[in-house]
Image (cartoon, helix red, strand yellow):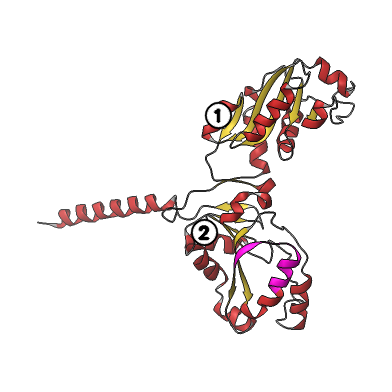
Amino acid sequence: MTRGVPRVSFRDVGDLDRVILRSLHMFHEEIDLVVGIPRSGLLAANLVALHLGVPLADLDGFLEGRVLSTGARLHSKTGPEVIDTARRILVFDDSVFSGSALETTRRRIEASSIAGELLYGAAFVVPSATTMVDIACEVVSPPRVFSWNLMSHSVLERSCLDIDGVLCLDPTPEQNDDGPNYRTFLRSAVPHMLPGQPVQALVTSRLEKYRAETEEWLAHHGVVYDALHMLDLPDAAARRAANAHAAFKASVYRGCDAILFIESNPRQAREIARTANKAVLCTGDFSFHEGNTTMQPVRRQVRRVRGKVRRIRSLRRRP
């Protein structure tokens, strides 16, 4: 990892489900109801409720005496009956960082007439938040990135994002003619994953001559960014000849203080991570690449071992 750049931790929905499954022994066996803290906490709470086989409520519904529909297999009682008879209630969130959302939730519940025993938990907590909850499935140091709230996460303010394949769909071969069809595509590209937070930099293999159309599309879709980096080549033929898509993106990423690059192409994602030696998240297959951080100590150790072997061999050859 580039010196001074913190290591980013990434978790996807599969990781969320796995960490909850591994932690089921931590949940009290007699939990009667799970309450999810909106909005992303409902995803985690739903998984817990499904695995435990108990009813689920969102926070507002819980305070108003409502549970979410569970179907005939789980429960036939109405919302008020479920809540009134629940002896142990688990209030669950996907993550705890500062604890402000959790504290707000506590105050709201304490101000209600809920009588059951309350437990508070989260799937992922930072080290400083472990004492804020009764159940912490996994402790993950910041900065952390979750696939389910990626485009609304504040990490975007320290991230580089590709455009085609990330913010919008890639052009089709017919659209990608470096001519009138391509200009039409640039103005009407179908949005894919639009950021809800300001972005540090957009880094694209689009050519500099298409800056006006690109900026127009970004403005139309409310994308806020500090910088837009584009390839300064005359045409698509020169871009194909240079074949420098990943190298260009890696050079921009390596030269700034961003801590994450979001790329859609798996091959380019691997190359950017290797070249820039910083974290890259690929939205094409949601793979996560940490650069060469784990390889550097190994390579140094291999060089030391090889050096010792050479010295031993030279000694053996001496008369």
Residue found at x 62% / y 59%? 199
Residue found at x 80% / y 26%? 63
Residue 222 within the segment the image draws in magenta: yes
Inter-mark Cα distance, 1 to 2: 32 Å
Q: Magenta span covers which residues?
A: 214-227
The mark found on residue 163 in the picture is: none
Indicate whether 99 appears above or below 148. Answer: above
Q: Of residues 2 and 111, which is closer to you in this image?
A: 111
Residue found at x 31% / y 55%? 303
Q: Of residues 227 and 250, which is closer to you in this image?
A: 227
The mark found on residue 130 in the picture is: 1
Residue 229 within the segment the image draws in magenta: no
In the visual, does 116 lie left or right of 299? right
Q: Position of residue 158 (x, y in %)?
A: 56, 55
Q: Give whichever of discs 1 and 2 has the lower sequence position.
A: 1
Q: Sort mark 1 into few (<14), some (14-19) or many (20+) by Cα contacts within 10 Å.
A: many
Residue annotated with mark 2: 273
Numbered disc in front, either 1 or 2: 1
Q: Position of residue 183 (x, y in %)?
A: 74, 78
- Image quadrant assignment for residue 195: bottom right
Indicate whether 275 appears above or below 18. Answer: below
In the visual, does 126 lie left or right of 149? left
